[in-house]
Image (cartoon, helix red, strand yellow):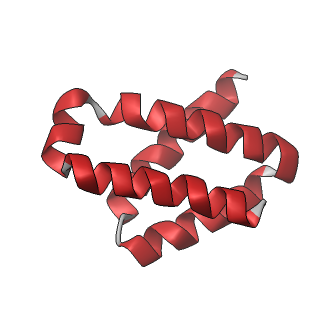
């Protein structure tokens, strides 16, 4: 679980950095993060919300992506509420 989450987040962060933040904003953070949240939600259902989100936030802080991850968390919470 831990390794899986790290790999997912690493891929996301690499993608974001490669694309460049401007391009991501133009194309819509929502689209990029929708895919992420789908994968995260799968992990959440298996492992429990709190544990997964703690890992995500820890990694986000390390990567210096606090603002981006706040948006992700908001979208993630909305998704959880919808289910």
The quarter of the picture where the N terminus appears is bottom right
Residue 82: percent from left, percent from top: 66, 22
Residue at screen point 73% across, 23% down: 83
Residue 54: percent from left, percent from top: 66, 66
Residue at screen point 84% across, 52% down: 47
Question: Is residue 74 left or right of 2 when viewed as pictured?
Answer: left
Image quarter of residue 51: bottom right
Please determine whether, in this image, residue 32 is positioned above or below residue 67. above
Residue 15: percent from left, percent from top: 35, 49
Q: Nearer the viewer, residue 71 or 59?
A: 59
How many labels were placed on the picture?
A: 0
Question: Is residue 49 left or right of 7 when viewed as pictured?
Answer: right
Question: Is residue 11 left or right of 44 when viewed as pictured?
Answer: left
Please determine whether, in this image, residue 28 is positioned above or below residue 8. above
Q: Residue furthest top?
A: 82
Q: Residue furthest bottom?
A: 62
Residue 70: percent from left, percent from top: 43, 54
Image quarter of residue 63: bottom left
Please determine whether, in this image, residue 58 is positioned above or below residue 66. below
Residue at screen point 74% across, 38% down: 42
Residue at screen point 22% across, 29% down: 27
Q: Nearer the viewer, residue 32 or 71?
A: 32
């Amino acid at each position: 679980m831990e390794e899986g989450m790290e790999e997912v987040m690493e891929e996301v962060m690499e993608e974001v950095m490669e694309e460049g933040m401007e391009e991501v904003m133009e194309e819509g953070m929502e689209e990029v993060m929708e895919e992420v949240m789908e994968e995260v939600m799968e992990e959440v259902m298996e492992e429990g919300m709190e544990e997964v989100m703690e890992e995500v936030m820890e990694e986000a802080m390390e990567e210096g992506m606090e603002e981006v991850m706040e948006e992700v968390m908001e979208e993630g919470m909305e998704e959880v509420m919808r289910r």
